[in-house]
Amino acid sequence: MMKKLALTVFFDAFALMLLGLIIVMSASSTYSAFRFESTFYLFNSHLLKVFIGLFFLLMFCFIPYEIYKYYSKWALLAMAAVLILTLIFAPSIKGAGRWLDLGIITVQPADIAKLILIIHLAALIEQKQEFISDFKQGYLYAFIWVMFISGLIFIQPNISTGALLVVISLTILYVGGAKFKHIALSSLFSLFVAGSFAMLFSHSRSRILGFIKAMSDGGDLNIQVKQALYGLGSGGLAGVGIGNSKQNNLFLPEAYGDFIFAILGEEMGFLGSVIVLLSYLILFVSGILIAKKAKDRFGQLLAFGITFSIAIYAFVNVAVTTGLLPTTGLPLPFISYGGTSIIFLSISIGILINIAIMNSKRENEIQVNSENMIKSGELKQ
């Protein structure tokens, strides 16, 4: 069973990455030609990162996941230092300093911090299992880590990623045994903090107020959402065909990134969009089953955290594209153009597959031991 789930996760993620290559090529061609004088510039960059991602995916499939819990605290402290360096040295792009240029690749540390925090929370809950329901002895310690890392992301400013990291973390804590009242109070506190940061910065404030105005009195949606809806609407049932999008001709700004679902919907139509959403659902269900069948608490929570983080990112991206949520800047997992995102999503999938593989081996060992005990009992008789 676990081997089948591992194969399902691998081929599902691989299919989404292949589709992402196709849609990124279509969505970025006009912009690439206009900006870089090469139709394939952004596609080639994305293709390289997909290859790197697949390499790491396969590599992490064979690294025993248990070792991560022994180094998670130090990795998270190192990640906090990187986030602080990002605040100091990262150039401001569109009012935010989120990326570190390493020459070969531009890294967004928040993507790395998300995975490491998930690992550390899983390790922490396993370590403090009997105390996690106690606010002072267990829960507060974990929540401080969540707010420390999320706070460093908030002040970049990257409100959407920080807020979603809090949601993912609190969900893991709740699944791990934390009391609902502690989660509820933490949620209210986090909402206040995230809302305060969002109102402090002009770009996030304008997005939220514009969204509220559009929802309350029928005001204009922002240009990206408006053009995204035009694209989705023109796709019809079966789409206009791959490469035939009109929105990618600079009508939809940066169509290859956060709003790539609009291009996908325009070119593949309602049916194609539903198939993609079903792919995320299959990935989610498979990941949850892996978490359920894992034999150790750390493996269960790590598998759940990885699976839930991918699912919620997909949900939020699609909700933003269709105008149900304010614009966030979060990518569509495996499909949007990106560097750090696609690489660390691939690493996450590799870890999820390893959890399935390692627990499949344990199941086989238990079965063999049981059979041997039965045989030895029969021989004695």
Image (cartoon, rainbow, N blue to C red):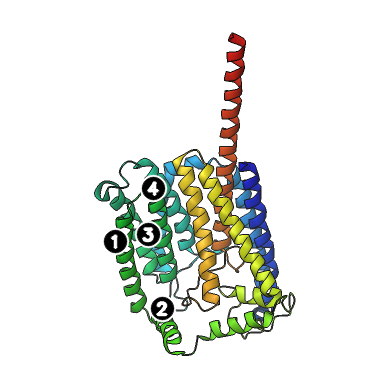
Residue found farthest to the front: 381
Three-letter code, disc 4? Lys
Q: Is residue 243 above or below residue 315?
A: below
Q: Earlier in the sequence, mark 4 or mark 3?
A: 4
Nearest to N terminus: mark 2 or mark 3 = 3
- Rendered residue at 62%/86% (across/down): 251
Disc 2 to disc 3: CB gap under 8 Å: no
Disc 3: which residue: 149
- Please give the label number shown on residue 73: 4
**Residue 250 drawn at (x, y percent):** 63, 84
Please rate how many residues cluster around mark 4, counting C-alpha atoms within 10 Å: few if below 14, some from 14 to 19, many from 20.
Answer: some
- Which residue is at the front of the view, 40 or 118? 118
Crowd band around label 1 with a 10 angstrom C-alpha radius: few (<14), some (14–19), many (20+): few
User: Could one spot residue 59 in this view of the protein?
Assistant: yes
* Cα distance between the residues tagged 2 and 1: 24 Å
> Does the image show residue 256?
no
Kindly identify which residue carries mark 2.
Answer: 204
Q: How many residues crowd around disc 2 within 10 Å: few (fewer than 14), some, or many (20 or more)?
A: many
Task: Work out how far the residue at label 3 is from the one at label 1, CA to CA, in angstroms.
Answer: 19 Å
Q: Position of residue 60 (x, y in %)?
A: 58, 47
**Dividing the image into 4 quarters, which one contains the N terminus?**
top right
Query: Could you tell me which residue is drawn at 61 percent across and 32 percent down?
Result: 364
Q: Which mark is residue 185?
A: 1
Q: Amino acid at mark 1?
A: Leu
- 38 vs 147, left or right, is right
Q: Residue at x 62, y 52 (%)?
A: 9
